[in-house]
Amino acid sequence: MTRQVYEALNRASSFLQENGREEGAARLLLQHALNTSYTGLMIIMRDEMTDAQWENYFDMIEEHKNGRPVQYITGSEEFYGRTFKVDESVLIPRPETEELIVEALKRIKKLFSSTASIQIADIGTGSGAIAITMKKEVPQATVIATDISPAAIATAKNNAKQLDAEIIFREGDLTAPLVQEQWDVVLSNPPYIAFDEAKEMSDIVLEHEPHSALFAEESGLVLYRKLAENLPPLMKTPSFIGVEIGYKQGEAVAKFFKEKFPQAKVEVVKDINQKDRMIFCEISE
């Protein structure tokens, strides 16, 4: 019995939709199963699939129906135009975090000369998405990436190697691995979801992504408070701090940084959906 690519896609899309999953996942998993791009998939829609390809594909569809994120099934996610390896040891990079990169690059251009050798730290690096992207976009920078999780550091090191990015990795909690130096740029996308928000979250996220990278105490604010308290002696002049936040946290997080950096310019920056998404604290003369 011959079965064509388009039949697999149609069947899988309907199956996922019937089971309350995004049908778009069917195409992404089919591209992965057939090792092709979106364009490539369009070209081979009428081609026949082998029995092994068919079975492998529907095994992945079943996994996703049961809640495993597509990115963990395929083992990768795109971020800022590059492919990062991801597994259950790290949070899947989100498009909103790309906006943190865009805003950070704008401020680097404004505060530093194009040849300045600046020190950048990424606190809680996870997959290494922020640190590696900053190194690729600002090659003259020295980039240090920290994480409390040895498994996350291992994943991030693998990504740095694959993407040919020279990163210094340090294991430790928040600012602890950074205290011997001073920094031009500190970026972080820390865990910021309040525990009582778990009931509103997708089972795909809750059951598979690492909770240590998602949830934080004090209504999700504890790590911002600690960063604001610990960073003042570690920042050069000029310098800046950029953190990603939950869309309801702008006012509270801005207040932490305004209290600890009274001379700094503290901004709440909105994302593409006009939701509060980032805080930038700019320290200048």
Image: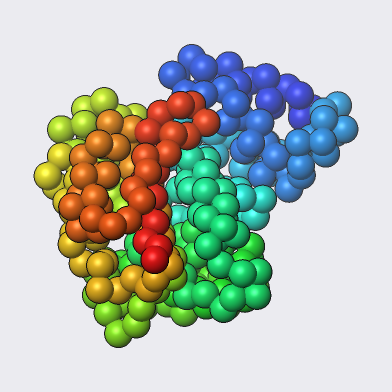
Q: Nearer the viewer, residue 77 or 263?
A: 263
Q: Position of residue 283 (x, y in %)?
A: 37, 61
Horizontal arrangement in the rendering, residue 176 relative to residue 157 (left or right): left
Which quadrant would residue 47 be assigned to in this image? top right
Horizontal arrangement in the rendering, residue 266 relative to residue 79 (left or right): left
In this rendering, the answer to whether 274 lies above or below 144 is above
Q: Nearer the viewer, residue 12 or 259?
A: 259
Q: Position of residue 133 (x, y in %)?
A: 57, 60
Question: Quadrant where the C terminus lies?
Answer: bottom left
Q: Position of residue 92 (x, y in %)?
A: 45, 48
Which quadrant would residue 28 be assigned to in this image? top right
Q: Position of residue 279 (x, y in %)?
A: 36, 46
- Pick out the residue farthest to the left: 218
- Residue at image position (40%, 63%) is 284
Horizontal arrangement in the rendering, residue 159 relative to residue 45 (left or right): left
Question: Quadrant where the N terminus lies?
Answer: top right
Question: By what rule are the colours in the image chosen?
Answer: rainbow
- Residue at image position (38%, 73%) is 236
- Residue at image position (25%, 67%) is 232
In this rendering, the answer to whether 160 lies above or below 81 is below
Camera sees residue 44: yes
